[in-house]
Image (spheres, rainbow, N blue to C red):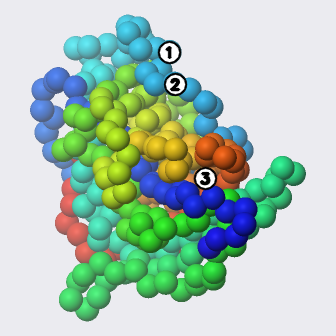
């Protein structure tokens, strides 16, 4: 879409919801995941505020670990990281065997906070008869966004991005720093700040990275929330800070169900405030035999 007010810039909102890096440590054995009881919390409720602005590394960089996690103890940081990043690798494989609905709504906002334009896309992610992954678009009206436009690459990201794309295999590309333990709704979590070791120059279709914070459930050692932003950027490609929440699916897997962003993107000749919501619903298992670390 173009108008006299539209700057021809691309807002490429890549949804990278998890980052972790493997520290040195002993290998942890693989166990079958426990089925959760009915009393186990099923989801983490979204907050009403966006993630706080922060530079990376975090203010805790270089500080000794909090007393509740000590090297050589049952709560060894390296072991926690190794186990939850391995779980992310396995969850990625399991996620590929699920059918779900994805709803994307992005709005540009005026100075009064009211929407001035909207991008909307509703699709069903399923499988063909031959077992190939496919996305069937159910509703996709013309975009009315002001000041930005969505490119074909953006549409591909919305439709095919994997929320577990940073796993144990590529986690060494990141630094990870333990922050604290935190109560998140009814869950007790370990909190980590993460950042890429090297941020390359922005290129269309290039590799994306995440800088932000992750919350890991202390019982299952699975990520239940992330907050941050994707990198790299350039003057014409800006990315909002976001929060991503997961829900316990089938009593075993913490899959993403809600992503929220409300941020101002600073382009050379204008500032554009956007609000983004992505919802994942109707999860149904297709087939899998994946086991998750416990």
Give the mark toward the camera: 2 or 1.
2
Tell me the SS state at disc 2. loop
Instruction: Kindly identify which residue carries mark 3.
Output: 260
Quadrant of the rendered image containing residue 74: top left
**Tag 1 residue:** 59
Position of residue 160 relative to residue 124, above or below, is above
How many C-alpha atoms fall within 10 Å of the one at disc 2: few (<14), some, or many (≥20)?
few
State the residue in front, 233 or 192. 233
Label placed on residue 55 = 2
Assign a secondary structure to mark 3. Answer: strand
Looking at the image, residue 213 lies above or below residue 259: above
Q: What residue is at 40 percent from the left and 80 percent from the top?
A: 135
277 w.r.t. 122: above or below: above
Residue at figure coordinates x 35%, y 71% from the top left: 98
| 27 sits to left or right of 294 | left
Viewer-closest of 36 and 266: 266
- The Cα–Cα distance between marks 2 and 1, rounded to whole angstroms, is 8 Å
Nearest to the observer: residue 23 or residue 59: 59
């Amino acid at each position: 879409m173009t108008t006299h007010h539209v700057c021809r810039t691309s807002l490429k909102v890549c949804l990278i919801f998890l980052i972790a890096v493997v520290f040195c440590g002993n290998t942890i054995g693989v166990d079958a995941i426990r089925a959760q009881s009915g009393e186990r919390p099923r989801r983490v409720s979204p907050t009403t505020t966006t993630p706080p602005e922060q530079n990376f590394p975090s203010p805790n960089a270089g500080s000794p670990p909090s007393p509740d996690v000590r090297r050589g103890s049952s709560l060894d940081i390296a072991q926690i990281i190794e186990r939850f990043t391995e779980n992310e690798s396995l969850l990625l494989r399991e996620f590929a065997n699920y059918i779900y609905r994805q709803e994307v709504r992005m709005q540009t906002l005026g100075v009064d906070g009211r929407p001035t334009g909207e991008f909307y896309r509703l699709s069903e992610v399923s499988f063909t008869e031959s077992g190939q992954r496919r996305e069937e678009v159910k509703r996709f009206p013309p975009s009315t966004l002001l000041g930005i436009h969505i490119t074909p690459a953006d549409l591909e990201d919305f439709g095919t991005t994997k929320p577990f794309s940073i796993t144990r295999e590529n986690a060494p590309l990141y630094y990870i720093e333990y922050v604290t333990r935190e109560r998140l709704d009814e869950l007790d979590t370990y909190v980590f700040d993460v950042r890429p070791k090297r941020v390359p120059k922005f290129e269309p279709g290039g590799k994306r990275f995440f800088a932000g914070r992750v919350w890991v459930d202390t019982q299952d050692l699975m990520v239940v929330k992330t907050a941050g932003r994707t990198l790299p950027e350039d003057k014409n490609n800006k990315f909002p800070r976001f929060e991503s929440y997961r829900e316990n699916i089938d009593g075993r897997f913490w899959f993403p169900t809600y992503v929220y962003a409300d941020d101002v993107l600073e382009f050379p000749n204008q500032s554009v405030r956007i609000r983004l919501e992505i919802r994942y619903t109707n999860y149904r298992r297709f087939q899998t035999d994946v086991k998750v670390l416990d």
